[in-house]
Amino acid sequence: MYQLIGKSFEGKQKSDAEIIDEIDEDINTLSLEGAERVALVKTRVNQGIFRERLLKEYDSCCLCDVKNKKLLIASHIKPWAASKANEKLDVENGFLMCPNHDALFDGGFITFKDSGEIVISEELSESDYESINVNDGMKIALSKKNKEYLCYHRKKVYKGKVR
């Protein structure tokens, strides 16, 4: 809409204040109310409850030794959007992970076998393993219910073949 800051479509110079006023007017004409805002708030509230439950189960990242609770992320095994209402807050549908491992897991670059052994996507090069702190020897403890959720993760989220 505004291709050049300080220029209108006719090529006339406008002040920053005039451009900001025009943008504000355009934003005010948009319908920003609705389910997306409600879902965002609802997700954050429920995500906090889910995280608190996982903090009671784990004292560190399930893959590495990061223990700082401010850094640990509640990661859904079966993604929130795909989960039924009772699955969204089920502690068995989650792992506590550091930001690095959470991004890899949520992005489908790692998953786990039913034995708990890590599976690393072919989309990652072996030279990246050290930088992103993953290796083929990593393993996590899994409950029976974790394994059920991981079946979904391996089929729908993971980007690769489980070897």
Image (cartoon, grey):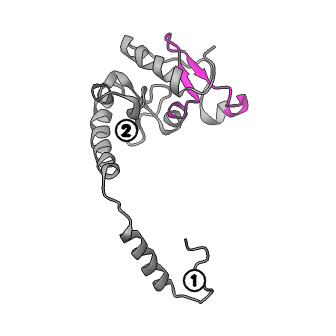
Nearer to us in this view, 102 or 68: 102
Residue drawn where x is 49% and y is 34% of the image:
102
Residue 72 versus residue 64 in the image, above or below = below
Residue 5 versus residue 53 in the image, above or below = below
Q: Is 107 a magenta residue?
A: yes
Residue 42 versus residue 81 in the image, above or below = below
Range drawn in magenta = 105-128
Residue 136, picture quadrant: top right
Tag 1: residue type? Ser
Residue assigned mark 2: 69
Image x and y of residue 151, in percent: 47, 16
Residue assigned mark 1: 8
Image x and y of residue 4, in percent: 61, 77
Image x and y of residue 115, in percent: 50, 10
Looking at the image, residue 122 sits to the left or right of residue 112; the answer is right
Image x and y of residue 65, in percent: 48, 29
Q: Is 117 a magenta residue?
A: yes
Tag 2: residue type? Lys
Q: SS class of the residue under badge 2?
A: loop
Residue 1 versus residue 110 in the image, above or below = below
Q: Crowding near pointer 1: few (<14 within 10 Å), some, many (20+)? A: some
Q: SS class of the residue under badge 1?
A: loop
Residue drawn where x is 54% and y is 15% of the image:
117
